[in-house]
Structure formats: structure tokens, C-alpha cells
Amino acid sequence: MKYKNIETNTIHAGKLIDETFGALSTPIYQTSTYTFTNTEQGSARFNGDEQGYIYGRLGNPTVRELEMRMAALEGTEDAAALGSGMGAVSATLFALLNAGDHIIASDALYGCTYALLEHKCKALGIEVSFVDGRNEMAIRSAIKPNTKVLYVETPINPNMVCIDLDMIARVGRNAGIKTVVDNTFMSPVLQQPAKHGIDLIIHSATKYLNGHGDVIAGIVCGAADMIEHIKLTTLKDMGAVISPHDAWLIIRGLKTLHIRVERHCQNAEVVSQFLEQHGSVKQVFYPGLESHEGHALIGKQMKAAGGVIAFEMHGNFDNAVKFMDQLQMCKRAVSLGDAETLIQHPASMTHSPYEPEQRRAAGISDTLIRLSVGLEHVDDILADLKQALALAYEDIARVG
């Protein structure tokens, strides 16, 4: 059953009833295979004549509940859970693309997604065009007769560029191509791309959906026929399978998703304003600020700006590194959406697969910092940032 408000849906929507024992908490079906009453039943399940589980790589009741919950939250017909966010990206793209096909992607992306497109897809004979995802004319101009997919993130990792989902859906629909959006930074609490006409929505469930830094997982949501195609081809044959225990941890995380995201947003709003006013910070990229061009999309497609901030420091690479190394409470770590505040340096970490000129073209400078604002008291987050910024320029010549 689906409810009117997402606060209720994060707890109840898509939940399966344990008819055997009436367990409130979802059972973990920790089994690799399933038994059949007789050979005829086994044959019927393999042939698709009877519904039921066969083998853990092909389905699991705990995993199925996670899929149903995510489909309910994203407002899609179905969903597939996978072993990682990149498993979700890879399974989705390779289910939609073959040698000779063409994909258009935004010119800034998560580093591993970029590497998959730039290196593996091209090596397999798939054409790739990177364009400014904000520019409708640039996207339209890039469309070819063999274009099959339009892929974007919004906000983009790591520079927080926001893309108009209505425009992306319209372009895709008019051209007869599938649209795919990575919704990791927002979560379905803040943004539901399917409501804007997007075909497939991807999440790194490692991030906000789980929220506790102890799971690697991915989700793709969409129409039932597309999800079935992904499950029966690339998920089944490439095997990026999520474990039942990890699925259970994400189900548990979903119960607090709304209140966690609310606190992330509140803290990030305060931190972004502090950074924008700090003399050592050159520019802040956060849609919650009126100075950010994506601010206009809040209320249109985003309920709030989220918990991730990017900011560019004055100076050079050494200043950025010294700032990072002086932090005490904020953890130097990739990933985002955890209870802890996490901070990373994209040019040397998550986006190192880019060549230097490609990083610059994507707006990823040597002094760009990505900050995932956590659930700590905001005053403690600010205190740590203040002391690290104060030390970032000691004994280093300030530039710019």
C-alpha cells in the first residue's frame, strides 16, 4: 500500500507481510537457492509458468521488498536492487546499449561513471558524446539516428550543477530515446524524476538510502518491462547481485530516510552560508544559495537543496590539501549521505579518472572540495571548518 505522504511511505510503502510468524522487521532470507516440491514445479518456475524463487542471483524475498519499497518511493512500476551503485549504472546502460549505438551524457559525472563511458563503452563500440546537460540545444544537436540513451546526474557530482528534468524528459521523448537520471544526491525524499517523465532512475544506495556507511548497493527504478529486461539480461548474466543482509540494512535505513535528509539539509544550509561569506573561499556551489543557478529548480523539481556542498578555495592545490589535512572531526573519505560529515578532494580522489583538461572542462579545479554535511550539531561542523581554513594558508603563498 502507498500513502499520501513520503514520511509514511519510507516506513510502510512496499512492505511485505510475514504471514508465517508476523515479524514486524523484515526477515533476512539468507539462502543461496530454493527447493522445489517436485521436478514439475522446478521446471514450471524455470519456464516462467509459475511464480516463485529459483536461485539467489535471480531473486530473494528480502531483496524483493527493498525493490518494492524503492519503486513506491520513486513512483515507478518496479525496481531492481544490485550489488553497487556502479553495478546499477553498468547493468542499466548495457541493457539499453549495444555496439553501434550512441549515448549522450552530461559533461560532468561521477568519476567511475565517466570512466565506464569514456573507456569501456567506447572500447565495446558504443559511441559517447559528452555535452552540457543544461543546454537543450547542445543536447538536441548531439542526437544521432543511433542515439539510444540520454544520461545525466542532477545535481552533478561533484560540482552541484543542476539539470532541468522536464527538459531532459521532453528531449528524450521527442527523439524516442531513453532517459536515465542518477538521483543519488537527492534521494526520492527531495526529487522524484519519474514525475517529470524520466524513464529510469538510478541510486547508489550506499549513500542516503542506507545512510550509515556500512553497505555497498545500487538501485534502478522504472517501468516494469524495462526493469524485467535489466533483471533477465545484465543483472542475471553479469551478476552484480546484492546480498539479502545488505538489502535488509537498506530497508532499515529507509525508515529514517526522511528525518535524516531533513537534518542534512538544515545543516548544509547553514554551512553553505558560512562558506559563501568566508574570505578563503572563492565560490560555493550549493543549490540552496540564491547565487546558484540551480536555485530556481527548488520547488520545481527539488523540494530542498540536499546535504552536499562543493566549494572552490582561493589559492592552489597545496592550499586545498593543507585544508583537508587540518580537519579533525570531518572525515576525509569518499562517499556521502552518512551520519558523519565526509569531505573529499575530487581532483585527486573520485574524479582522478578524468584527464586534467577534461576535469577543467567539467568545472573540477585543483581547489574544488566536496563536502557531505552530516548529522552532527552544525556548530561543531562549523568549528572544524573554521580552524582548518585558518590553517590552510600558513606558510603557503596565497594565490588568486
Image (spheres, rainbow, N blue to C red):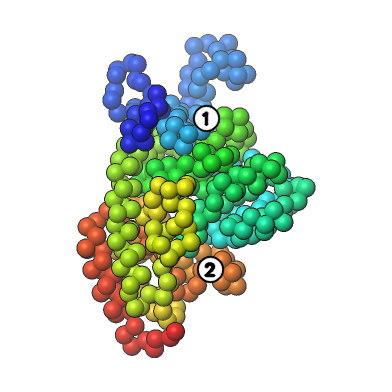
Residue kind at label 1, given as amino acid type: Glu
Secondary element at image label 1 = loop
List x then y, in percent, for residue 20: 33, 16
List x then y, in percent, for residue 14: 41, 28
Tell me if mark 1 has few (under 14), some (14-19) or many (20+) residues whose alpha carbon lies within 10 angstroms of its own. some
Using the rendered view, name the quadrant where residue 307 is placed: bottom left
* Residue annotated with mark 2: 363
Q: Earlier in the sequence, mark 2 or mark 1?
A: 1
* Mark sitting on residue 55: none
Using the rendered view, name the quadrant where residue 282 is placed: bottom left
List x then y, in percent, for residue 339: 30, 52
In the rendered view of the protein, which quadrant contains the N terminus?
Answer: top left
Residue 76 horizontal side relative to residue 299, left or right: right
Residue 75 horizontal side relative to residue 248, left or right: right
In the rendered view of the protein, which quadrant contains the C terminus?
Answer: bottom left
Tell me if mark 2 has few (under 14), some (14-19) or many (20+) residues whose alpha carbon lies within 10 angstroms of its own. some
Q: Measuring 52% from the left and 30% from the top, which residue is drawn there? A: 77
Whole-angstrom CA distance, mark 2 to mark 1, is 36 Å
Marks 2 and 1 close (CB-CB < 8 Å): no
